[in-house]
Amino acid sequence: MRTWTADEVRDLPVVVDLVTAGSALGMGRTASYELARRGEFPVAVLKVGHRYRVVTAHLRELLGVQPDGEPAGAKHPAALRALP
């Protein structure tokens, strides 16, 4: 089982298939499908027809990977300026 880097997770498209999401979480294909079928996959799973899809933003959030490379929990400078 390979280990994903934060950059690889950042580079994922907006939505990924269940096997890709499971792999990023350190799971194999069988475990990913079994958890999805039971409604126990660690992030929300969308069922589109007969296919499972995972929103990458949810995956990034669970893994603590920010889309722009900032560490998890970092505030964007523009957001800080908007504070009273």
Image (cartoon, helix red, strand yellow):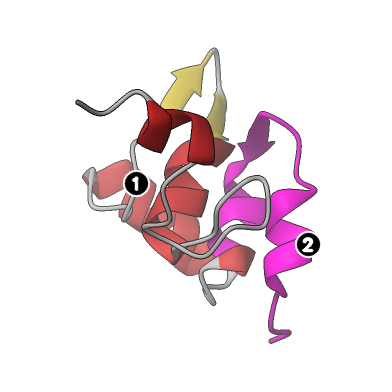
Q: Is residue 82 left or right of residue 28?
A: left
User: Would residue 52 be found to the left or right of residue 15 on screen?
Assistant: left
Look at label 2 and name its amino acid: Glu
Front residue of this view, candidates 69 and 25: 69
Which sits in the foreground, 38 or 20? 20
Which residues, given as a range, are shown in magenta? 1-22
Q: For residue 29, say whether it is visible.
A: no
* Quadrant containing the N terminus in the rendered view: bottom right
Q: Is residue 66 above or below residue 28?
A: above
Marks 1 and 2, how far apart at CA: 18 Å
* 55 shown above or below 66: above
Q: Which residue is mark 2?
A: 8
Q: Secondary structure at mark 1?
A: loop
Q: Check residue 27 for magenta coloring.
A: no
Q: In the drawing, does residue 84 fall left or right of residue 21? A: left
Residue 84, horizontal then vertical, whole percent: 19, 26
Task: Please provide percent x and percent y for residue 47.
Answer: 45, 22
* 48 up-or-down from 33: above or below: above
Q: Which numbered circle lies on residue 43?
A: 1
Rendered residue at 77%/63% (across/down): 7
